Image (cartoon, rainbow, N blue to C red):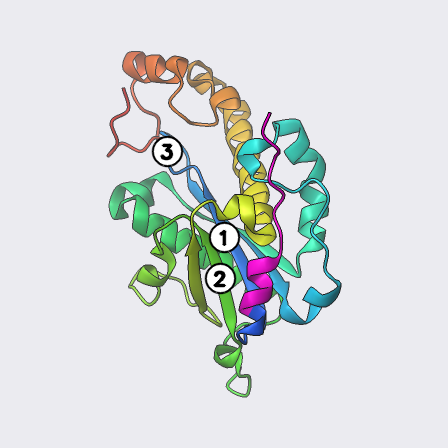
Amino acid sequence: MSIQEVPTLRLERELADGGAELIVGFDEVGRGSLAGPVMVGAAMIRACDLPSLAVPDGVADSKMLTERRREAIVDELKSWCAAWAVGSASNAEIDEWGISHALGVAALRALAEAERRLGLDGTDADRTDAAVRVAGILDGPNDYITKTLDTFDAPDVPAPARITTLVKADRHCATVATAAVIAKVTRDRLMVELAHAHPEWAPYEWEHNKGYGSAAHRAAIAELGPTPLHRVSWKLT
């Protein structure tokens, strides 16, 4: 039996040693869903806190945890961060922009919100928010965050992050694993809320599949057609 890998703060410390004052882990959820938004979680820590910061108990790649376990630890993970946020892009935005750009916008929305929760807002001419050195760790091989920065659709970010990509960062980096759990819980809760708020959409079974392409979900689309929350540019059946 393989031993489950425990995320560390090794890369976060390397980025701090390189001059970063804030380190933020990013992870996405909902990329492959047929309905609902895509979301990107951001979990931010301060470099100055790293000497005394420990990896939270039980944190792991969100896909390795049960739904009950994610729900049990999410509040602790939120408290562990200096700031956290979850950015989203709607199904309509995904249809308009494509998934990669939508992910970039969602990530920048999360980054901007997390920074503002720390008091960075970019609105005061006397502040030097843009000079704050922020390092980001993004799960996966593709830096869709930097590509989206300063595009027409991108939100204003008080202090842009220099992104490092890492495949399976959600297994190796505590900030990314934390962001993954927070994003997963946030999106799962939303899809359940939408299912309960719209009993007419019960055949799609979002409370169980969270918008992903289960057999029941695809059968309902084939029979009833898409709802206003489906990604109609995608192959749905």
Q: Are marks 3 and 1 in contact (CB under 8 Å)?
A: no
Which numbered disc flags the more N-terminal residue, 1 or 2?
1
Magenta highlight: main SS: loop
- Amino acid beneath label 2: Gly
Q: Is residue 232 left or right of residue 16?
A: left
Residue at position x 51%, y 70% in the image: 134
Q: Are marks 1 and 2 in contact (CB under 8 Å)?
A: yes
Residue at position x 31%, y 33% in the image: 231
Q: Is residue 209 left or right of residue 142?
A: right
Tag 3: Cα neighbours inside 10 Å, few (<14), some, or many (≥20)?
A: few
What residue sits right under mark 2 in the picture? 136
Q: Is residue 114 visible?
A: no
Which numbered disc flags the more N-terminal residue, 2 or 3?
3
Q: Which residues are magenta?
A: 1-15
For residue 149, above or below residue 206:
below
Q: CA distance from mark 3 to mark 1?
A: 17 Å
Q: CA distance from mark 2 to mark 3?
A: 23 Å
| Quarter of the N terminus within the rendering | top right
Residue 78, horizontal then vertical, whole percent: 67, 50
Residue 162, horizontal then vertical, whole percent: 43, 68
| Quarter of the C terminus within the rendering | top left
